[in-house]
Amino acid sequence: MFKQFTENISGNQVYLLFSLGIFLVFFIVVAVILFRLKKSHVDHMSDMPLHDSQIGSSNTLLK
């Protein structure tokens, strides 16, 4: 099946296949990273915007 694709590739189609390969590799790498994250790290990062004590201390520094 792949042999048929590679035999009939013209000049511009190489760029299309290359960009498709980059696209697939990128999202596979992102999926692997997301599945390897620890649940405690995800919970910590999701709670960060809700902590008012850190926001209050940064506002006093700006005054």
Image (tube, rainbow, N blue to C red):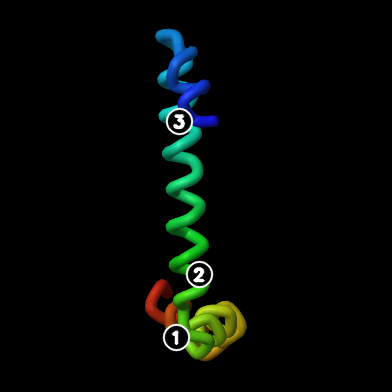
Look at the picture and state if 25 lies above or below 63.
Answer: above
Q: Nearer the viewer, mark 2 or mark 1?
A: 2
Q: Quadrant of the N terminus?
A: top right
Cα–Cα gap, marks 2 and 1? 32 Å
Kindly give the residue lying farthest to the top in the view shown.
11
> For residue 19, which numbered disc appears in the image?
3
- Report helix, strand or loop for mark 1: helix
Q: Are marks 3 and 1 in contact (CB under 8 Å)?
A: no
Give amino acid for label 3: Ser
Image coordinates of residue 7 in percent, x first then y, are 44, 16
Q: Foreground: 51 or 19? A: 19
- The image's mark for residue 34 is 2
Say which residue appears at 50% left-offset and 44% top-offset: 24
Name the mark on residue 57.
Answer: 1
The kind of residue tagged 2 is: Leu
The relative height of residue 38 versus residue 9 in the rendered view (above or below) is below
Q: Residues within 10 Å of mark 3 (few under 14, many from 20)?
A: few
Q: Which of these two is toward me, 61 or 41?
A: 41
Q: State yes or no: discs 3 and 2 in contact (Cβ < 8 Å).
A: no
Instruction: Identify the residue at horizontal 42%, vertical 39% (top origin).
Output: 22
Residue 43 lies, in percent from the top left, at 56, 86
